[in-house]
Image: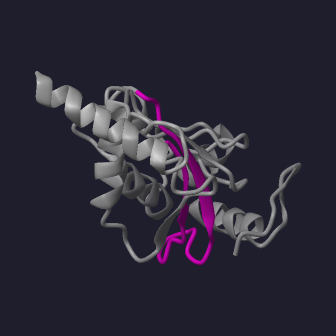
Amino acid sequence: MIRLFKVKEKQKELAEANGGSPLKRQSAGELRLHKDISELNLPKSCAISFPNGKDDLMNFEVSIKPDEGYYSGGKFLFSFEVSPIYPHEAPKVKCKTKVYHPNIDLEGNVCLNILREDWKPVLNINTIVYGLYHLFTEPNHEDPLNHDAAAVLRDNPKMFESNVRRAMTGGYVGQTLFPRCI
């Protein structure tokens, strides 16, 4: 027990010598997230960035550039907000790029089962990124957030492909203007 106090005293002395404030204690969620990020094995078409700096691991962005499918050539940015109780709660993921997609609504909400009812603590950030990537290579019209896009994909795949291209090049689909993301 005495050794434990000596270790804590030494940490406090080190912190004071390095500028004053004691070392910030990491939550279990931060520790797990740090492990997940250090073990990331992303496809070449995906990248992770930390807009608030490496000190804020709980908020980061992932960009996905699909190299196949309807969305090939586009660049889509997702924000991740990770709870302190991660991995017991799935990260909050939003698409920051306005996209014509059956599983992503115009506000950026994402319909991916592992972010909702199928989340389990054994899943990790790598799994989510691959799930998001899969949404672009195989959009799913059966569980939509954007019902109009889902109906077009289901009933007229050629028209859906045309709408996706128009949206990605910065055009209108219906009454909605999409910014260029290609």
Q: Relative to residue 85, is residue 140 drawn left or right?
A: right
Q: Tell me which residue sits at (43%, 39%) in the image.
A: 23
Q: Nearer the viewer, residue 124 or 16?
A: 16
In terms of image quadrants, where is residue 49?
A: bottom right
In terms of image quadrants, where is residue 11?
A: top left
Q: Quadrant of the N terminus?
A: top left
Q: Relative to residue 96, is residue 137 drawn left or right?
A: left
Residue 69 against residue 124 in the figure, above or below:
below
Residue 50 locus on image (x, y percent): 56, 57
Q: Is residue 60 magenta?
A: yes
- Range drawn in magenta: 58-84
Q: Relative to residue 132, is residue 161 drawn left or right?
A: right
Residue 128 locus on image (x, y percent): 39, 49
Residue 157 locus on image (x, y percent): 57, 61
Q: Tell me which residue sits at (54%, 71%) in the image.
A: 65
Residue 83 visible, this orientation: yes
Q: What colour scheme was applied to this rendering of the protein?
A: one colour
Q: Quadrant of the C terminus?
A: bottom right
Residue 127 visible, this orientation: no
Residue 172 against residue 82 in the figure, above or below:
below
In terms of image quadrants, where is residue 100?
A: bottom right
Q: Tell me which residue sits at (30%, 33%) in the image.
A: 9
Q: Is residue 123 magenta?
A: no
Q: Nearer the viewer, residue 120 or 15?
A: 15
Residue 163 locus on image (x, y percent): 71, 63
Label total for image: 0
Q: Nearer the viewer, residue 91 or 7?
A: 7
